[in-house]
Structures are given as C-alpha cells and as structure tokens.
Image (cartoon, rainbow, N blue to C red):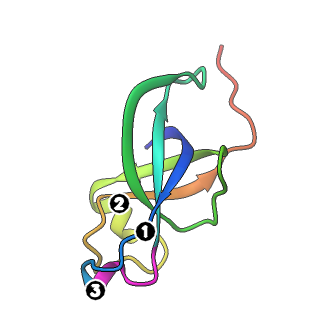
C-alpha cells in the first residue's frame, strides 16, 4: 500500500464490463511526508474520496479484493481516506 492524493477523475464510456459502476480517479503518489514523487496512476475508488484528499492505495491482487471488485480488471484501488500521518 502507499499514500496518494486524489488529483482528478477519469470518465470512460467504453471500458471492461468489470469496471462498470466504478469511479476512476487519478492519484498522485506521495512520500511519507506527503510530498509528491512525480508518479500518477488511475485507481478505482471504494471509499468516496474527494478532490485533494490524501488516500491509501493498494495494488495488485489486493486491489481486486476491495469493495465489490473481486472479479475486476483493476490494478489499483483507493481503500482509505487519511486523517493524519505521523513519522518519527
């Protein structure tokens, strides 16, 4: 899993049927200090994330276990909205 910031949305009227009904968001990957690292990805949203929110993203087979995505082609899912991050 990693941290990201929701920076946009993707609208796709033609997509794999396993993604129908899924909200697709653009997420910028962040460091543990919440600084962008220059990498973005498209992730399915399972928690209702809003623009600018810091989120937890999971990828690979774990992404398909989130929400109702069990048989989906997704490779990244937003599985949490972050309130705070503490590093020492």
Spatial CA span between label 2 and label 1: 24 Å
Q: Is residue 20 magenta?
A: yes
> What secondary structure is marked by label 2?
helix
Image position of 4 with respect to 65: above or below? above
Which of the 4 quarters of the picture holds residue 87? top right
> What secondary structure is marked by label 3?
helix
Q: Which residue is mark 3?
A: 17
Q: Position of residue 67 (x, y in %)?
A: 49, 75
Seen from the viewer's position, the closer of residues 87 and 21 is 21
Which of the 4 quarters of the picture holds residue 33? top right
Spatial CA span between label 2 and label 3: 20 Å
Assign the N terminus to one quadrant of the image: top left
Classify mark 1: residues with Cα within 10 Å, few (<14), some (14-19) or many (20+).
few
Q: Position of residue 83 (x, y in %)?
A: 75, 42
Spatial CA span between label 1 and label 3: 14 Å
| Label 1–label 3 contact, CB within 8 A | no
The residue drawn where x is 65% and y is 51% is 51
- The segment highlighted magenta reads 17-22
Q: Position of residue 9 (x, y in %)?
A: 50, 58
- The first of marks 2 and 3 along the sequence is 3
Q: Is residue 51 magenta?
A: no
Seen from the viewer's position, the closer of residues 30 and 85 is 30
Could you say which disc has been placed on residue 11 in the image? 1
Looking at the rendered image, the disc whose residue lies closer to the viewer, 2 or 1, is 1
Q: Which residue is mark 2?
A: 62
Assign the C terminus to one quadrant of the image: top right
């Amino acid at each position: 899993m990693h941290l990201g910031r929701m920076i946009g949305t993707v609208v796709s009227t033609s997509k794999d049927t396993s993604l129908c009904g899924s909200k697709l968001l653009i997420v910028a990957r962040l460091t543990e200090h919440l600084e962008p690292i220059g990498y973005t990805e498209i992730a399915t949203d399972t928690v209702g994330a809003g623009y600018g929110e810091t989120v937890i993203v999971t990828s690979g087979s774990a992404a398909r276990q989130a929400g109702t995505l069990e048989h989906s082609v997704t490779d990244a899912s937003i599985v949490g909205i972050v309130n705070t991050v503490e590093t020492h």
